[in-house]
Amino acid sequence: MKKKVILDVDTGVDDALGILLAVRSGNMDVLGITTVNGNVSLDQATKNTCKILQLLGMEEKIPVVKGADKPLMRASHFEHHVHGNDGLGGALSDMPVHLQTTAGHASDFIVNQVREHVGEVTLVMTAPLTNLALAVMKHPDLIHQVKEVIVMGGVVQGFGNITPTAEYNMYVDPEAAKIVFQAGFPSLTLVGLDVTRKALLTDEHIRELGDSPIARYVQESTANYMKRYYERNGVRACALHDPLAVGVALNKQLVTTRHYYVDVETRSELCDGQTVCDFQNRLSKEANVHVCMDVSADEFLQLFINALRA
């Protein structure tokens, strides 16, 4: 049976690649895609999500539900210099959007779908965690009804990608992340920069995709993303942050995880949004997060390529 999933996105370049992988894998029953303010505005993230579904020819089959238009307590912090002003690196700029979003709020959609399929739904969160935090605040019993939560975000052993210590999704809404981490989900996996920085899409990988509308989209959308990555890291590649979270939902064997207590800093001048992992149990608190420590990057990249060129 296909795995029932809800994707929660702020659709920029890598969220879009995650959506492509989820749908093209053939192993996921995507119950819906919820959108949130993050890389781009809520409206732009929603528009981008609709475009990706239209590219896939799935606009009639997967509902899109808008969620929070700002973080819980903070101002928005967009990433236009990485994802472009439109969030997709200028790709699909001429595509008109004809997909109608589903009425209601993303947080309620998440709750309703999980209640309809108790114990079956995997939440794949590749954006700031505002929508899930709102869902948990409204319905705390959600934690016992969801199958698992997979979060792309954070970094526990390396440096951040928005500040010296913070990964973007955690930095944008650390209060939401704190709520989610402390909610008590029995199975919560953190797919952070520690592993996503090892999953690098190169020009060679893109050539392996062949010549198709999806392959051409991937090449166009990642061009500026690769340029920015090279400027910062000296490697011409595109880190598959969000697709790896989808990959972990497809196959847990792709990663090695350790169970730790993890919290998020919300009151620091220098370290807001830092994911603090208690490796030595200094805080004497029960482990709450399965933290990804290593990844079989080549195996994941082959999965990604095979799905998109299928």
Image (tube, helix red, strand yellow):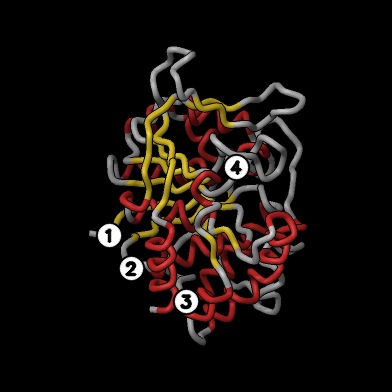
Q: CA distance from mark 2 to mark 4?
A: 26 Å
For label 4, the crowd category at 10 Å Cα-Cα, with few meaning under 14, some 14 to 19 and many 20 or more, is: many
Q: Is residue 60 above or below residue 173?
A: below
* Marks 3 and 2 in Cβ contact (< 8 Å): no
Name the residue tied to disc 1. Answer: 2
Spot occupied by residue 122 in the image (x, y as percentages of width and height): 36, 46
Tell me the crowding category of disc 1: few under 14, some 14 to 19, or many 20 or more residues within 10 angstroms, Cα based: few
Query: Where residue 281 appears, x then y in whole percent?
Result: 44, 17
- Measured as percent of width and height from the top left, residue 101 is found at 56, 60
Are the residues flagged by discs 2 and 4 in contact, CB closer than 8 Å?
no
Label whose residue precedes the other's in the sequence (2 or 1): 1
Q: Earlier in the sequence, mark 2 or mark 4?
A: 2
Q: Amino acid at mark 1?
A: Lys
CA gap between label 3 and label 2 equals 14 Å
Q: CA distance from mark 4 to mark 3?
A: 27 Å
Which residue is drawn at the image coordinates 47% and 80% (left, top)?
208
Q: Secondary structure at mark 4?
A: loop
Q: Give the residue at mark 4.
A: 128
Please, what secondary structure does the residue beneath circle 3 have? loop
Which residue lies most toward the front here? 234
Q: What's the residue type where badge 2 is placed?
A: Gly
**CB atoms of marks 4 and 3 within 8 Å:** no
Q: Tell me which label, 4 or 1, sits earlier in the chain.
A: 1
215 and 64: which one is in front?
215
Left or right of residue 138, residue 232 in this image? right
Residue 57, numbered circle = 3
For marks 1 and 3 on the same chain, the one whose residue lies earlier in the sequence:
1
Q: CA distance from mark 4 to mark 1?
A: 26 Å
Which amino acid lies under the numbered mark 4 shown in the image of this protein? Pro
User: Which residue is denoted by mark 2 in the rendering?
Assistant: 26
Give, as a three-letter code, the residue at label 3. Answer: Gly
